[in-house]
Every structure is written in C-alpha cells, then in structure tokens.
C-alpha cells in the first residue's frame, strides 16, 4: 500500500509539473484530492489494515496528500497572481494623459453687479429685503400713492394677471411691504434687488424684463442731504473716487421732492461722448423723499418720521461699468458675450 501511495505521489507530481492552465489544475485537484480520487479510496481502505500498519500507512498517506496539496496551492497562487496582474494592467490609468476640462459656468454679469451693489450697501449698514415678482395692485400702485385711474400709472405700462394682480413694474412695492412688516419701528434701512416687468418695447436701453435695486431709509430727521451723501458714496465706491452725481428735479407719486440721479459718464470722464450724448452725464436711478401719504398708509406718522428712497436700474449700471452698448446682450445668452465676464 505504501508503494501504491508513493507511486501515486510521483504520478500526481509529474502530471502537475505539466499543468498549463487553471482548468487543468482544477481537473488534477479533483482527480487526486477529490472524494472519488485514489487517495480517498486508499484512506477508506485503511480499516482493513493491521493495527501496526495503520499509523505507518496513515502517515505516508498524509505526507503524500500534503505534498500534492502543496504543489497545487503553489500553482494556484501563481495563477491568482497572474490574474491580478493581468487585471491591474488592463485597468491601468495613464495619469500622464491630459485631462478633459469640465465645462464651468460663471456668475452672470447682472448677478455680479447686484452682488457688488449689495456689498456696498451692506457695508453702510443696510439689510437685504425681498418681495414677490407677482404683486398685488395695492402694493405696486395704490399704497405708493397711485390710486386707480391715476394718470401717473401710465409711466409704467404693466402686465396684468387679473384686475388686482400684476407683474411688479418696479421694486418700490417692497418699500410698503417692509414698512408694514416693521410696524412703525425705526430705523428702516433696506435695499431690495429684484426683477421687474414692463410693457416697454425692447431696444438698446429698454427691456420688458429688467432688474432694479430699491433702497429705503426711514428714521427721525432723515433729510435730502442724507440721500445725496449716500448716493455719492455709493457711486464713488462702484465707479471710482472721481465720479460725481447730479440730481435733477423729477416726479414720482411716491416721493416728494423727487430727483433723477445722473453720474459722470464713465466712458469720457464727463467730457462728453457718444454714450452720454455729449452731456457728460448718465442717468442711473430715480429717487426722492418718501411721500407723507406713503408713510401714513404704511403706519408711520409723517410728522415724526421721514425717509428717502431710490430705485436703480441694474442693467444700466452694468452697461456703464462694462461699456456694453445694448441691454439685450444680457438676455440673449450668447456665450461669446458671457465669457468676457468670467474673470471679472
Ligand atoms: C421707478 O421705477 C421708481 N420706482 C424709482 C424710484 C424708487 C423713485 C424709489 C423714487 C423712489 P423709473 O421708472 O424711472 O423709476 O425706473 C428706475 C430705473 O430703472 C431707471 O432709472 C432705469 O435705470 C431703469 N429702467 C426703467 N425702465 C427700464 C427698462 N425698460 N429697461 C431697463 N431699465 C429700465
């Protein structure tokens, strides 16, 4: 039996030495170590041996099994390593290849200008308020001293949704909403950026949808000179220290007195050029002292409190700041235009 075992070992090792692939190795494992293999058969027959022979043959059988297992395991380890290497080679990432740049978006120039203006006013102690774009007639007009059929309603041609609801024509309704929220408390010191809508015909300087920034300050003793000083500081921070402002008498039903504000033309420094129509000045906003009736309707006693307000056209400011000749560039989404603002 011992000879049978030894020749079995030799036979197995010789066959194993010729194995060429994983399949052949699997077959030999089953052939020599499987339940139906010769080794198992020999071990099963050990019961017939004498008590002296049994441990000796048992030991030889274990040695033979161990030797065969060892060779199979070594070969298996080789195959495993080869397989891992092949997989790694196939998966190799060439880190020297140039990357594909991801298409990155950028902040729209109008959003940039809004952020810049917000920063300037926040630096002066203002907070940023918001209001709805779909607005009630009451807030857009009536509470701003523009009752139904008031002729000044024609100054802002409107998109009505129903008789009482419209797309807001300016950010001034946020003045009223803020005063209502503050319930007569002072100081009120807010700015409100937002989209507004008008039935204006689109041209180089007009859009049916554009952006305004409203400003409102209410306290005791607020005067026109506070408005002037605030706007001067604002335009000098935005356009540079040499910028001057000019206030022209104007009319808004919700301010008295009212003024339109011009800044020195950034293109020519006030010398006069095509952009400023040779006047040296460019209009950027409407403003004034909050009308006593507006204060009263919103719950502030005009005998005690006063305030100023202004409404600035953001596109017009952006056009000045970046020398853009047509407002429609902001909305046609031509990437050649928008890409010029990526690094500003
Ligand atoms: C108003 O809208 C007032 N609510 C401003 C105001 C607020 C006055 C608070 C007093 C107190 P106006 O209609 O002039 O005013 O518009 C203000 C600014 O918006 C203008 O100076 C201009 O810069 C801009 N603007 C007006 N219409 C258009 C338009 N169609 N397209 C682009 N910008 C416009």
Image: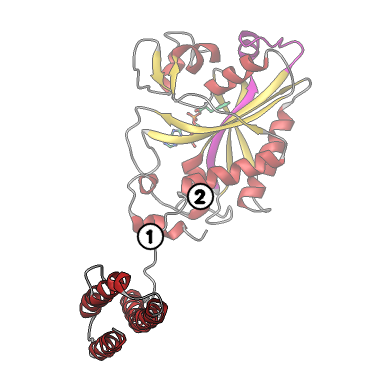
x 59%, y 36%: residue = 261
Q: Secondary structure at mark 1?
A: loop
Q: Along the horizontal axis of the image, is 304 left or right of 263?
A: right
Task: Give the residue number, with chain letter if any, for mark 1.
Answer: 103
Q: Secondary structure at mark 2?
A: helix
x 45%, y 11%: residue = 150
Q: Quadrant of residue 168?
A: top left
Give the colour scheme shown: secondary structure
Up the image or down, 83 lies above or below 194; here it is below
Q: Along the horizontal axis of the image, is 69 left or right of 251?
A: left
Up the image or down, 213 lies above or below 142; here it is below
x 75%, y 10%: residue = 303
x 66%, y 49%: residue = 237
Question: Within 10 angstroms of label 1, few (less than 14), some, or many (20 or more) residues?
Answer: few
Where is residue 258? Give x, y as percent. Answer: 60, 25
Segment tinted magenta in the rendering: 281-305
Asked whether 141 falls inside the magenta stretch, the response is no
Task: Give the residue number, with chain letter if any, for mark 2.
Answer: 320
285 vs 269, nearest the viewer: 285
Q: Along the horizontal axis of the image, is 163 left or right of 19?
A: right
Q: Quadrant of residue 36?
A: bottom left
- In what quadrant of the picture does the N terminus appear? bottom left
Up the image or down, 252 lies above or below 90; here it is above
């Amino acid at each position: 039996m011992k000879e049978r075992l030894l020749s079995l070992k030799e036979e197995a090792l010789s066959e194993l030495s010729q194995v060429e692939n994983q399949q052949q190795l699997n077959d030999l494992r089953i052939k020599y170590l499987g339940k139906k293999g010769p080794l198992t058969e020999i071990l099963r027959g050990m019961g017939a041996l004498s008590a002296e022979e049994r441990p000796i043959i048992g030991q030889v059988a274990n040695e033979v099994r161990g030797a065969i297992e060892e060779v199979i395991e070594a070969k298996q380890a080789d195959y495993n390593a080869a397989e891992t290497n092949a997989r790694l080679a196939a998966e190799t990432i060439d880190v020297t290849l140039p990357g594909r740049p991801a298409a990155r978006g950028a902040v729209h120039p109008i959003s940039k200008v809004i952020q810049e203006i917000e920063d300037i006013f926040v630096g002066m102690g203002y907070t940023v308020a918001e209001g709805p774009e779909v607005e009630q007639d009451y807030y857009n007009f009536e509470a701003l001293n523009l009752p139904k059929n008031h002729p000044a309603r024609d100054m802002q041609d409107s998109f009505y949704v129903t008789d009482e609801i419209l797309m807001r024509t300016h950010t001034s309704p946020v003045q009223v909403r803020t005063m209502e929220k503050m319930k007569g408390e002072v100081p009120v010191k807010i700015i409100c950026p937002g989209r507004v809508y008008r039935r204006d015909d689109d041209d180089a300087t007009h859009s049916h949808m554009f952006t305004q920034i409203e400003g409102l300050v209410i306290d005791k003793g607020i005067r026109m000179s506070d408005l002037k000083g605030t706007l001067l500081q604002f335009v000098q921070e935005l356009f540079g220290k040499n910028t001057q402002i000019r206030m022209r008498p104007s009319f808004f039903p919700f301010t008295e007195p009212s003024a339109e504000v011009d800044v020195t033309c950034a293109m020519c420094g006030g010398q006069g050029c095509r952009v400023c129509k040779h006047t040296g000045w460019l209009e950027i906003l409407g403003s004034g002292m909050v009308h006593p009736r507006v204060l009263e309707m919103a719950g502030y006693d005009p005998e005690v409190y006063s305030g100023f307000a202004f409404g600035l056209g953001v596109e017009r400011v952006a056009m000045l700041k970046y020398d853009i000749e047509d407002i429609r560039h902001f909305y046609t989404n031509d990437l050649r235009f928008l890409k010029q603002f990526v690094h500003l």
